[in-house]
Structure formats: C-alpha cells, structure tokens
C-alpha cells in the first residue's frame, strides 16, 4: 500500500491524520502459495484448508498513512540488526539472491543512523521490494516500500541507492515516530508541500508536533 498522505481511508475506515495514531493488528487470509506480511511483528499463523491467516501487531502507535500490507510469492529474509533488533526483508522469491547484496546493508544503515540521532524507535525494520512502478519509495512504519528497479537498474550508482535506503530509514525517526500534528495541504507532494488548498481540518488537541 502507498497511503500517504491521506488515502488510507480508501482501504479501511480511519481518520487519516498523522497525529491520530493507534496500535494495529492485521489479520490477512490468503490462498496457499502466497505470503502475507504487514507492519510490526508476526503474532500467529493459522491454516484453514487451502488458506492461511497471517497475524501481525505493531508494538508502537502508527499513523494510518503508514500502514503496509504485502501479499505475494515472497521470501521473508530474517537477520539481526544492532542490539539484536529483528530485521526482516520481503522480496519476490525469484529475486532473493539477486537482492541480497543490498538487503545485507540494512544493519549498517541502522547502526549509522543510531550514531547520528539515537536508538531506533520501533520493534523491527525491513525492506519491502515490490515488482511495480510507483515512481517513489515510501517509509511505511517498520517496513519501507521500494521499487524493484531501484536495486536492478544498472544506471543507478551505488551511492544513490544507498542514500535512498537511508533516507527512508531516517523517516522511521522523523515522520513516523515524531510526526506532524497538522495535516498536509491538499495537492501537496511527498516531502515537499506545494499545494495551496487546505484539506478538511482534522486537527489534534496538542501542539505542533506529536511524538509516539
């Protein structure tokens, strides 16, 4: 999913305001052969004949715009990050080995960010690689969304791909954990508000920034 800035209500009933955070539980039922992954940590898996229900729970409150669900023929790659932080990447099964040189960089990225700004704020992190053309990458909480082409396009230099990966990771601190209390302008673009028509007011009862 790519719900920013206020499209989550088109998927599930919600108040699409970045300051109106909640704990999420996802229960996703899929046919055999498909893997379901969502924000947070796994909390169970139950088979029902030819279908399986996967459950995930967030360990911290989350804005609706940051909700993420992946359903597909996917490999889930686990590794340990700094201080034992559980990392899991979700990639097309056929690309598991192809993408590994990029996936294994994440522990170092997290370690570098922690040296700059402090401890990682959530219960897990990982990269979700989608074989789709979105035109952007997205810092959905604990599971950042990336286009496959970012990692497979030969014309993209290594430093550029690294910088995009760290950019989305940095948003876990700034944008996800610490988030704006005043919503976006209608027509604004990601990272650079340019719209001039205010959206329907959904203002929180607190000051200009809300921490979670």
Image (cartoon, rainbow, N blue to C red):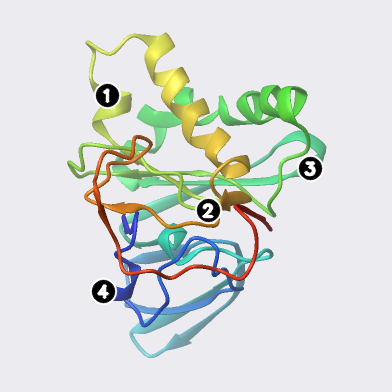
Q: Is residue 91 above or below residue 29?
A: above
Report helix, strand or loop for mark 2: loop
Contact? badges 1 and 3 (CB < 8 Å):
no
Q: Is residue 57 above or below residue 178?
A: below
Q: Nearer the viewer, mark 2 or mark 4?
A: 4
Residue holding disc 4: 10
Q: Nearer the viewer, mark 1 or mark 2?
A: 2
| Camera-side residue of 34 and 15 | 15
- Quadrant housing the N terminus: bottom left
Residue holding disc 2: 141
Residue holding disc 3: 84
Residue projecting furthest to the right: 83
Residue 134 picture location, percent across and down: 21, 43
Residues at marks 2 and 4, CA–CA distance in whole angstroms? 19 Å
Q: Which mark is residue 152?
A: 1
Q: Nearer the viewer, mark 1 or mark 4?
A: 4
Side (left or right) of 112 relative to 133? right
Report helix, strand or loop for mark 3: helix
Residue projecting furthest to the bottom: 48
Circle 4 packing at 10 Å, graded few (<14), some (14-19), many (20+), is: few
Residues at marks 1 and 3, CA–CA distance in whole angstroms? 29 Å
Residue 132 picture location, percent across and down: 20, 45
């Amino acid at each position: 999913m790519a719900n920013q800035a206020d499209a989550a209500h088109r998927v599930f009933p919600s108040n699409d305001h970045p300051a109106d955070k909640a704990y999420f539980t996802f229960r996703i039922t899929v046919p055999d052969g498909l893997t379901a992954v969502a924000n947070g940590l796994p909390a169970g898996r139950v088979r029902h004949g030819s279908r399986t229900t996967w459950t995930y729970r967030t360990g911290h409150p989350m804005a609706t715009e940051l909700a993420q669900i992946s359903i597909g023929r996917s490999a889930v790659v686990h590794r340990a990050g700094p201080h034992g932080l559980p990392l899991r990447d979700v990639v097309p099964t056929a690309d598991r080995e192809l993408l590994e040189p990029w996936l294994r960089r994440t522990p170092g990225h997290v370690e570098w960010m922690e040296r700059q700004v402090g401890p990682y704020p959530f219960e897990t992190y990982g990269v979700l690689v989608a074989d789709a053309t979105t035109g952007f990458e997205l810092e959905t909480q604990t599971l950042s969304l990336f286009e496959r082409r970012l990692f497979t396009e030969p014309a993209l230099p290594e430093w550029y791909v690294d910088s995009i990966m760290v950019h989305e990771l940095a948003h876990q601190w700034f944008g996800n954990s610490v988030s704006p209390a005043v919503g976006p302008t209608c027509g604004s673009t990601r990272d650079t508000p340019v719209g001039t028509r205010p959206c329907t007011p959904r203002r929180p009862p607190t000051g200009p920034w809300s921490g979670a």
